[in-house]
Amino acid sequence: MRNPVTDDARTEITRLANALGFDSVGFTSGDGDARVGLRGFLDKGYHGDMTWLAEAAERRSAPMALWPGVRSVIALGMNYGPARNPLGQRELRDRGNVSVYARGEDYHKSMKRRLKRLAGDIHRRFGAEVKVFVDTAPVMEKPLAQTAGLGWQGKHTNLVSRDFGSWLFLGEIFTTLDLAPSTAEADRCGSCRACIEICPTDAFPAPYRLDARRCISYLTMEYKGHIPRQYRVAMGNRIYGCDDCLAVCPWNKFARRTRHFAFAPRAELTAPRLADLASLDEAGFRQVFAGSPIKRTGRDRFVRNVVIALGNSGDRSGVPAVLSRLADGSPLVRAMAVWALLRLATPDVVAGARHQHLAEEKDDAVRAEWNTEAPSPSPGQVH
């Protein structure tokens, strides 16, 4: 027979969570183990240069490995659903395409404030110890969310919710309370392969397997080097993240627009002009992206992405913005400015820029871009 105290605790915790703005609440035990799936991901090198995944692999594999005192995990979700399907923004070639999750306030801060308040209430009411996590520690959030009934990990490896589609931010409270677990959510992907087939870089070697090294979200947000040539055109106008595999999911028919003001898109991130973003210096970048998760990527990597998008725009009016970045202080930016110039500019403009900049260029990667033959644009691409 179940302990009535823990039943009452679950009901009360759910009520408190809903009052604080959490849209989804579930419970799971602290004895799960994701070691096999994580080890396979790491052994294949799918994590790329996200070395922190490998360094904390053992602690990440199970809640008890992170905190031996945990008896239950409270999994919580907040809906950040957009007003319209973001796939349409791929066609705005002179505009930057920012992932839906990053268009508003940094969810880590907004969600953590609520998690701390809820954890404090749990501690005061039940005398339990608590620890709060929101993508800031080695926690396998999506497997925990699935066992807690918030959704299931789809073939794109992201969580899918029957109530909110692809658009749930996740957070957890580890506690010493012994709470009865929720019913785990079943996989409801069926035979659908929409998320796999839409991926512009073929980042899914198999259903439920992601090779982050090919993923545009990884390349634009996490990768610190020069974007490999084979992925640049596929990036299109995506300058921070990629929502394609999320946005195409049929379960989004049940999604709804977020009710949280903090997650509403900032005007300057809804469809920003690429030429404006390319002109950002360090101070300007910090000012524009204060309070945004984009700030963590840093100015150089972000402008690197912007210049690639300019090169993909097919719009020669962007050539002045590209030319201005040929003398940028970052070789990441300079290299992509060369690549973009070769795609957009007329031969005489390219020749003049090469004469001006190549002789003084010290970075091997940038010099290699200058010495690459200019690609022929697709018919109708440059206008």
Image (cartoon, grey):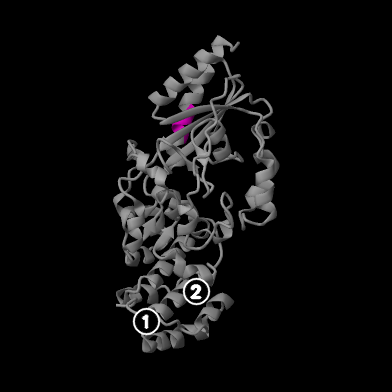
CB contact under 8 Å: marks 2 and 1:
no
- What secondary structure is found at the residue carrying circle 2? helix
Is residue 121 shown to the viewer in this render? yes
What's the residue at 66%, 39% (across, down)?
Answer: 61
Q: Is residue 254 magenta?
A: no
Q: Which kind of residue does numbered mark 1 sit on?
A: Ala
Residue furthest toward the front?
191
Tell me which segment is drawn in magenta.
112-116
Is residue 105 shown to the viewer in this render? no
The quarter of the picture where the N terminus appears is: top right
What's the residue at 38%, 74% (across, down)?
Answer: 322
151 is higher (above) or lower (below) than 284: above
Question: Would you call the spot at circle 2 few (<14 residues within 10 Å), some (14-19), or many (20 or more)?
Answer: many
The quarter of the picture where the C terminus appears is: bottom left
Left or right: 113 with respect to 181?
left
**Nearer the observer, 29 or 176:** 29
- Position of residue 219 measured from the top left corner of the image (x, y, whole percent): 52, 60
User: Which mark is first along the chain, 1 or 2?
Assistant: 2
Q: Which mark is residue 335?
A: 2
Q: Which kind of residue does numbered mark 2 sit on?
A: Ala
281 is higher (above) or lower (below) than 267: below
342 is higher (above) or lower (below) than 182: below
**Nearer the observer, 5 or 172:** 5
Majority secondary structure in the magenta region: helix
- Position of residue 140 measured from the top left corner of the image (x, y, whole percent): 59, 40
What's the residue at 45%, 85% (across, down)?
Answer: 354
Q: Which mark is residue 345?
A: 1
